[in-house]
C-alpha cells in the first residue's frame, strides 16, 4: 500500500527521506520502500510517525484526508464539517481569517467534485527521493 500521505507530511515539513528514516532508526532505502508501498511498516513505526508528525495513524494510512491528530479532532465542536475543514485550510493558505463565505466553499467543493481530474497529482512532484 502506497502511503502518499506520509510523503506529503514529509515534504510539507521540508524533510528528506533520510530525516524520517533517522526518526525510525532505519536506512533511507528501507524507509523509501515503506513510503512507496513496497514494504509494510510495523505498528511501532506507524505510531512513532503519527506522534512525530502530530497526526493520526488513519491519515498516514490514507483512511482520512484530515491530517489533524486525534486530540485536535476531539476538541472540535460536534457540528464541525468538511466545509469547516476546507474553510480553515483556505484561511491558512491565504493568511486571511475567514477569507471566503461558506457558500463560496460549497461552490468550490462542487467544482472539485465535478472536475476531479483537474486535481489529480497536485502536490506530488513525482520525486520519491527527498
Image (cartoon, grey):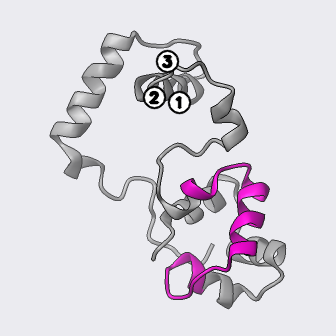
Boundaries of the magenta span: 33-59
Question: From this viewpoint, is residue 2 visible?
Answer: yes
Check disc 1 and report its element: helix, strand or loop.
Answer: helix
Marks 3/1 in contact by CB < 8 Å: the verdict is no
Badge 1 local density, few (<14 within 10 Å), some, or many (20+)? few
> Reading the chain from its start, which is encountered first: label 2 or label 3?
3
Q: Mark 1 points at which residue?
A: 89
**Residue sitting at 50 percent across and 29 percent down?**
85
Query: Magenta region, mostly helix, strand or loop?
Result: helix
Label at residue 113: none
The CA distance from mark 3 to mark 1 is: 17 Å
Q: Name the residue under label 3.
A: 79
The CA distance from mark 2 to mark 3 is: 14 Å
**Residue sitting at 22 percent across and 47 percent down?**
116
Q: Name the residue under label 2.
A: 86
Badge 3 local density, few (<14 within 10 Å), some, or many (20+)? few
Q: Position of residue 62 (x, y in %)?
A: 48, 59
Residue 12 vertical position relative to residue 112 in the rendered view, above or below: below
Check disc 3 and report its element: helix, strand or loop.
Answer: loop
**Residue sitting at 69 percent across and 26 percent down?**
75
Q: Where is residue 49 in the image (x, y as percent from the top left)?
A: 73, 64
**Residue sitting at 49 percent across and 65 percent down?**
4
Q: Where is residue 71 in the image (x, y as percent from the top left)?
A: 72, 38
Check disc 2 and report its element: helix, strand or loop.
Answer: helix
Q: Nearer the viewer, mark 2 or mark 3?
A: 3
Amino acid at each position: 500500500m502506497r502511503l502518499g500521505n506520509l510523503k506529503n507530511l514529509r515534504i510539507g515539513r521540508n524533510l528528506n527521506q533520510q530525516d524520517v528514516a533517522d526518526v525510525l532508526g532505519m536506512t533511507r532505502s528501507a524507509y523509501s520502500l515503506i513510503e512507496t508501498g513496497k514494504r509494510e511498516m510495523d505498528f511501532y513505526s506507524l505510531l512513532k510517525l503519527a506522534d512525530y508528525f502530530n497526526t493520526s495513524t488513519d491519515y498516514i494510512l490514507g483512511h482520512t484526508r484530515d491530517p489533524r491528530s486525534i486530540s485536535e479532532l476531539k476538541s472540535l465542536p460536534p457540528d464541525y464539517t468538511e466545509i469547516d475543514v476546507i474553510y480553515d485550510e483556505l484561511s491558512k493558505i491565504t493568511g486571511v481569517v475567514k477569507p471566503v463565505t461558506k457558500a463560496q466553499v460549497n461552490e468550490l467543493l462542487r467544482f472539485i467534485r465535478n472536475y476531479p481530474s483537474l486535481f489529480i497529482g497536485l502536490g506530488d512532484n513525482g520525486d520519491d527521493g527527498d
